[in-house]
Image (tube, grey):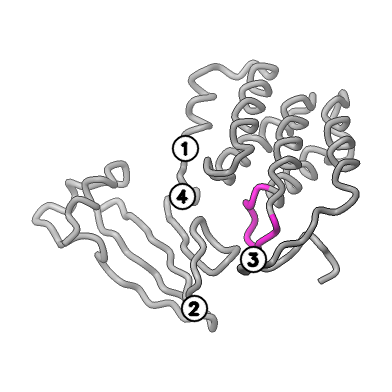
Amino acid sequence: MSDPQHVVRELGMVKPPTPARALAIGFTLASGWLGRDVDGLAADLATTARKDAAAMDIYYRPDNGLAGTVFAALGELCSPAAPEALWILHVQVTTSQHPHKVLVKSVKKAAARRGVPPHELTARTVPRHGLEPDGTLTIGWTGRGAVWVNAALDAVVALHDDGRVTVDWTDGAGTTTRTVAPLMRISENPQACSRSSLGCVLNKGG
């Protein structure tokens, strides 16, 4: 592949970082000190952060140092687009990523600069634990979904408002098959479980 940072994750496959990495970190830090968002800088920084924090739909080799640098730069950037980019990154980047602590600090710094009230900051930074905005969880091949497995199918787990849990299995040809209630028995009162009470559903497994 033309991009040396774009590799398929396989056991034993290790590539050295690019010689320009230190220069990239320096330029990234400097970009955060600009007084305004120049030519969509916030969007470019967000894309770089997603790539280096394993938050893209395809797999790129993570770079914790560069990802943390980008988070810090976005936290310093005086632009209305910077907080919005950080909100989205807070959703997309899992807490297991090492630079996530830097992301949290940058979100708070950007929110304070923009005068975001504490209640809104709390609402915008609720941990999603890999859930998509619509509440589904995708488990797929390397680079797709919140959990990566060596399987020939992608699985999308969804908890519905009526308490049902479904799994949609999609193969390489795009054919989807649904499994209904894989984690619970049909209860007499399925409405007792809601999207906000996932533990209720899981405890019914059997």
Tell me the residue that label 2 is attached to: 152
Residue 95 versus residue 113: which sits nearer the camera?
Answer: 95
Residue at image mark 3: 9
Residue designated by label 4: 131
> Where does the C terminus fall, quadrant-wise?
bottom left
Q: Horizontally, is 26 left or right of 162 in the view?
A: right
Disc number for residue 127: 1
Residue 8 screen position, x and y as percent: 67, 68
Residue shown at 63% from the left, 52% from the top = 54
SS for tag 1?
Answer: loop
The amino acid marked with disc number 1 is: Pro
Question: Are the residues tagged 1 and 4 within 8 Å (C-beta)?
Answer: no
Q: Nearer the viewer, residue 119 or 103?
A: 103
Foreground label between 3 and 4: 3
Amino acid at pointer 4: Leu
- Sequence-earlier tag: 3 or 2: 3
**Residue flagged by tag 2: what amino acid is it?**
Ala
Gap in Å between the C-alphas at discs 3 and 2?
16 Å
Q: Quadrant of residue 85?
A: top right
Which callout, 3 or 4, points at the residue further toward the start of the chain?
3
Q: Which of the two discs, 4 and 2, sits closer to the camera? A: 2
Q: Which mark is residue 199?
A: none
Secondary element type, mark 4: loop
Main secondary structure of the magenta stretch: loop
